[in-house]
Amino acid sequence: MSTKQALLEPIQVGDLNLSNRVWMAPMTRSRAANPENKPFEIHAKYYRQRASAGLIITEGSQISKRAVGYINTPGIYSQEQVEGWKKVTKAVHEENGHIFIQLWHVGRISHPDFHGGELPLAPSAINPNEKSYTPEGFKETVTPKAMSLEEIKQTIEDFKNGAKNAMKAGFDGVEIHSSNGYLLHQFFSATSNVRTDEYGGSIENRTKILFEIIEAIKEVMPENKIGVRLNPSLNGVFGMKADEKTIPTFDYIINKLNDYNLAYLHLSEPFTDVSDIPYLEPNIAKRYRPIYKGTLVINNAFDQEKGNKIIEEGLADAVAFGKLFISNPDLPVRFETNAPLEEWDQSTFYTPGEKGYTDYPLVEETNVG
Ligand SMILES: Cc1cc2nc3c(=O)[nH]c(=O)nc-3n(C[C@H](O)[C@H](O)[C@H](O)COP(=O)(O)O)c2cc1C
């Protein structure tokens, strides 16, 4: 019997043989500070440093100009952006790593300043009452424009185009960002989606856009290169307000995802304490592991011990680590050697340049001297 930690066991995902189950969670770092919002050398350096992750999932990357909601986030809709991402995928592959790109549309978590004065797009005209990080600093969100059927169709096309570009840029796959209160999550929730057409009302209607996006992406890449991210018990953050319909909606989505041979399903445990809310699920992996038949990746506030435990218990196949990967680029090596972990510096999460981005030490550098 292997004495290896569960997190360090290899895992097959689609056609990929991943060397471990310590995955890097998608994290916006706002370093694409150029007019084209293209990744460049510092992105390649940052992701190369983290290539020992079993799988890197990149920061959310907008699939169109209309999909953006934060300054300096990279896109995946233009040729310049594809060229920039090629540098990133090449760097990660040179280190024998694997990398998926997260395809992102923020929906109403945006501001007219990003759209030449036009309103952000959302399922319904309901203000999330959040803040948007604009070029002039944080601003209050506005009441968005309810998308027309034409705009929904275009958005599905944009996701497909993002996936096509991801293939051109050399990614191993894509993760559909249907989580954390952004556009697709806004469609799922009856508190942000009050549409009366085929995209609103019933559970089937509110979740339809996700399956249409999966079908569209399948036209340009095999389904075993598609991951889906969900955060079922998100409540009170990113403008999301859960209700009695929330968990049945996610039960439906996750059951239906079994119809596809996806790369993985990426779930988050609740971001806030929901144990007092009777209609929300406090134990996401426990609820959904028996339901989802494919590879299940779990996230939120895991450390080495909790990560090993949840895999050993059979409740997840891999763990996505976020902040720990910001400050510990060689996290799997540190787990393997039980090396000490570096603290992350929150003040540089979203600041431009290399500070707090590419200057965290590797463990061998820490040990020198
Ligand atoms: C700086 C930062 C940026 C993030 N950006 C994204 C993002 O672009 N897409 C996404 O799905 N989640 C994003 N998240 C959420 C993380 O993927 C993850 O769910 C969260 O950090 C909890 O995991 P952790 O406790 O291991 O850090 C971000 C988190 C942080 C800290």
Image: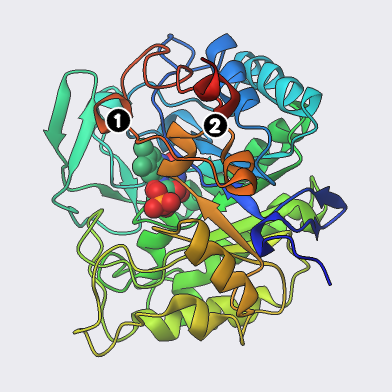
- Type of residue at label 2? Pro
Q: Colour scheme used in the picture? A: rainbow
Structural distance between the alpha carbons of marks 1 and 2: 14 Å
Q: Is residue 251 left or right of residue 21?
A: left
Q: Position of residue 231 (x, y in %)?
A: 42, 65
Q: Which residue is mark 1?
A: 345
Q: Residue at x 55, y 71 (%)?
A: 309
Residue at the front extreme? Answer: 369
Q: Is residue 283 left or right of residue 83?
A: left
Quadrant hosting residue 69: top left
Callout 1 crowding tier (Cα within 10 Å): few <14, some 14–19, many ≥20 = few
- Residue 228 higher or lower than 288, as above or below: above
Quadrant hosting residue 179: bottom left
**Residue 312, numbered circle:** none
Q: Secondary structure at mark 2?
A: loop
Q: Which residue is mark 2?
A: 329
Q: Residue at x 23, y 30 (%)?
A: 133
User: In the image shown, does 178 or 363 lie closer to the viewer?
Assistant: 363
